[in-house]
Amino acid sequence: MNRLVLCLVAALMASPAAVAAELQPHRATFNLSMVPGAPASSGILGVLGRMLIEFEQVCDGYVTRQALQMLVRDALGQTTETRYTLTTWESSDGREMTFDSTSTFGTQSDPSYAGRATKGEGAGAGRIAYHVPNGNVPLRPGAVFPTEHLRSLLDAAAKGEKLLTQEVFEGGAPQNYTAVNSSIGDTIAADPAAKLTGGRKSWNVREAHFRPGGRSEAPEFEVGLRIYEGGIIDGLDLDHGIFRVAGKLSALELLPPPRC
């Protein structure tokens, strides 16, 4: 179940490319629910929850704050609450990221992680320096950070490109990498009548997430989403194979840019 939480985080969060995408600071609320039709073998009968995401532009980069609360009902009829929080800062040039994450599942607390990831020079490996828990591990060569991935995805969509492949380090545990293959649909014209996202072009995107270096031809999970200009996301469809979770944007507040 904690992997499900990380999948949701990966779905909602995405080196500046040649044409840098302009990102819209915003605060968004998503309602989460389980898509009917999961087989009994999944052991999960229902999912209900909410995720809050605040994306802020600061003078030296981007700050993202996420908070997830979810109720999971299993085949025994028991309901367990899971919570996850993640705060990240990413530098404007995409070279550094700090992160601080906590998670609980029921009464059990998972390990917390806090530290700084720094890219290496050229094609060399960088470093992830943890202060919770203490220790250093290499950052895989070529890995990008979530906001960097989001900018690259928007740039590719704006140019009419249909495929993007990147390896993303999401922050948190050292193993939180995914190799992401993104399939990008045609441009959808802006709908001025849309209550939350009117006036913005958008693209339907399907992302397949693999373990980096894995030999399996099947992805660990797939994510469908609709991404709007500025990086606002809606219409989440997280397909974990044996069950699916949908995320619907229910509230959106646009935030002002920084005064630098």
Image (cartoon, rainbow, N blue to C red):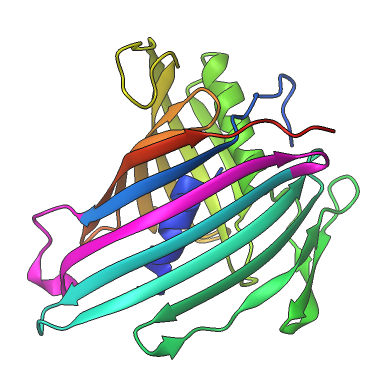
Q: Nearer the viewer, residue 248 or 3?
A: 248
Q: Is residue 121 left or right of residue 1?
A: right
Q: How many marks?
A: 0
- Which quadrant of the rendered structure holds the C terminus? top right
Q: Quadrant of residue 98?
A: bottom right
Judge whether residue 44 is colored magenta: yes
The correct choice, above or below, for 2 with respect to 170 in the image is below
Question: Residue 115 location, x and y as percent?
Answer: 75, 70
Q: Nearer the viewer, residue 30 or 240?
A: 30
Q: Is residue 205 left or right of residue 181?
A: left
Question: Residue 51 location, x and y as percent?
Answer: 40, 55
Residue ranking furthest to the bottom? 107
The correct choice, above or below, for 83 with respect to 144 in the image is below
- Which quadrant of the rendered structure holds the N terminus? bottom left
Q: Is residue 205 left or right of residue 125?
A: left
Question: Residue 244 location, x and y as percent?
Answer: 23, 55
Q: Residue at x 44, y 80 (%)?
A: 104
Question: Residue 130 location, x and y as percent?
Answer: 76, 75
For residue 107, say whether it is visible: yes
Judge whether residue 259 is colored magenta: no
Q: Nearer the viewer, residue 116 or 79?
A: 79
> Magenta stretch mostly in which secondary structure?
strand
For residue 218, say whether it is visible: no
Q: Is residue 123 left or right of residue 229?
A: right
Q: Residue at x 15, y 83 (%)?
A: 78
Q: Quadrant of residue 62?
A: top right
Q: Residue at x 88, y 45 (%)?
A: 122
Q: Residue at x 71, y 24 (%)?
A: 20
| Highlighted magenta segment, given as a residue range | 34-61
